[in-house]
Image (cartoon, rainbow, N blue to C red):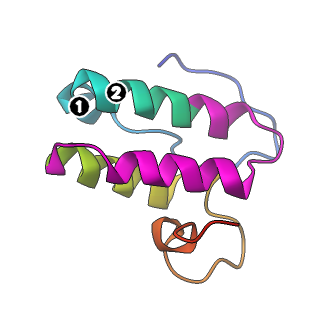
Amino acid sequence: MMNETLPNFWPKEQIGLPLELIMNLNAEARALYDKIYDYCTYAADPQYQTLHRFRNQINRLADAGDRDILIGYFNQDPAIRFHGMHGEPFEYYAEPY
C-alpha cells in the first residue's frame, strides 16, 4: 500500500496492516484484506451489510493464522470501529442487519 494523503477529519492512527503482516497472508486472505481495506478507506459511509459479509468471508478462510490477522485488522480499523461501539467490531457485525 502506498502512503496517501487522507482528509483532515480522518483518524491519525495507523490505517491498515503493517507490510510484514500483509506479506504473511496467503493469496486468498491478501485479496480479501485488499478488498476490505479499499472499501473501508474510500467508502463515505461503510454499510453494516457489507461489513457483515466481510466478517463472514474472514470466518471462512481456511488458515487460522490468516483469520487471526484479519480479525485483528477488522477490530482496529478506524472506519469499521465507530465512536461509541461497545465491544469488538468482529462480534458487533456477527448478526445480519
Label 2: which residue? 30
Percent coordinates x, y for residue 90 in the rendering: 47, 65
Residue at 58% x, 56% y is 52
Q: Distance between the residues labelled 1 and 2?
A: 6 Å
Residue at 16% x, 51% y is 64
Which of these two is toward me, 62 or 87? 62
Residue 61 as seen in the image, left or right of residue 9? left
Percent coordinates x, y for residue 46 in the rendering: 74, 48
Label 1: which residue? 25
Residue at 51% x, 46% y is 54
Residue 19, above or below 53: above
Q: Does the magenta stretch include residue 52?
A: yes
Which numbered disc covers residue 56? none
Q: Is residue 12 visible?
A: no
Q: Specify few, some or many for label 2: CA neighbours under 10 Å numbering under 14, 14-19, or 20 or more.
A: some
Identify the amino acid type marked 1.
Leu
Residue 66 as seen in the image, left or right of residue 33? left
Which of these two is toward me, 68 or 8? 68
Q: Can residue 89 be seen in this view?
A: yes
Which of these two is toward me, 10 or 35? 35
Q: Give the range drawn in magenta.
A: 38-64
